[in-house]
Image (tube, grey):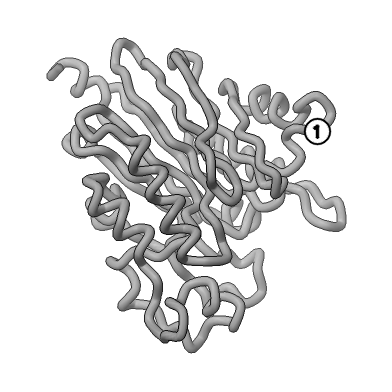
Amino acid sequence: MTVMRVMTYNILDGGVDDDGSDRWPLLLEVINTSKPDLLVLDECSHFDANGYRNLHRMERETGLRGLLAESTTGYHVALLVGTDIDIIEHHPLQGPHHASLWVRCVRRGLPFAILAAHLCPFGGQTRLMEAEALTRAAKLDEWVFIAGDMNAISPRDAHGYDTNQWLPRRRVRHLLPNSNDIDTRAMALLEASGMVDLAAHAGRAAPTVLTPLVEDHANYEVRLDYVFGSPPVVPWLTSVDVITTEAARRASDHYPLVVELDDEAARRAA
């Protein structure tokens, strides 16, 4: 059986810390061990610098081919694909606070589309509008993925979080205005549109932030990174995992999420 692995990973400031320390060896260990066929990277800071040197470095070190959606915030979004995937067309979506990239592909005769996204961290109303843009771009009768750091909490998870333990800046980002209720509107909208939260569907809705790279991680362990699939994707889902290896604990403040699908069986059934 051949499978398709979709991975989303926020790599924190392009994999380089303020003091110049380079987390790339750890990031590459995590990525290459996971063997993704589709890799969404958020916070690709400086990937556009020096003739896209870091984008090309990521391609070279992973064996994947990349596209970059550039953001005015500097937090670019990249999509990298395996050599057996043909990119048919691509364009950035207008409006996201950071960036979003729509790509149509074919793998061994199976067509699909992916929207790689990084939504606004600061306000729920902005995230809601960004989620609306994603739903407008998704066609539910085709294979479609929406993947990335959504900076938003799912209504499936909200009951399990004690927001009183969060720092004030995190409470402001996630609570409804003038309320102690968690703002789940963006992720609720994606599900209401017909897209399926694949981790929740598989019973694997585990936290993706924060890792021990951040000192106060224990008080803020939430799920912000998602892979959504259109209804035709769901029957072929075989596994969902949040990667929490020792390398992943030190490579970024996010853990990566990997979704696996039996695309070979899907082709046979088509």
- Residue occupying image coordinates x 72% and y 35%: 47
State left or right for residue 217 relative to residue 157. right
The reply to whether residue 14 is in sight is no
Nearer to us in this view, 167 or 19:
167
Question: What x and y, as percent, mark residue 59?
Answer: 64, 24
The residue indicated by pointer 1 is: 49
Helix, strand or loop at disc 1?
helix
Foreground pick, 52 / 180: 180
Characterize the local packing of mark 1: few (<14), some (14-19) or many (20 or more) Cα atoms within 10 angstroms. few
Q: Could you tell me the amino acid type at mark 1?
A: Ala
In this rendering, is residue 28 above or below 103? Answer: below
Q: Is residue 267 visible?
A: yes
Most foreground residue, 146 or 134: 134
**Image check: 110 left or right of 43?**
left
Q: In the image, residue 263 lies at what x, y percent?
A: 27, 24
Q: Is residue 264 above or below residue 219?
A: above
* Residue 14 placement, left or right of 178: right
Q: Identify the residue at image location x=33%, y=36%.
A: 138
At x 46%, y 31%, the residue is 102
Front-lying residue, 260 or 72 = 72
Residue at image location 70% in from the left, 44% down from the top: 72
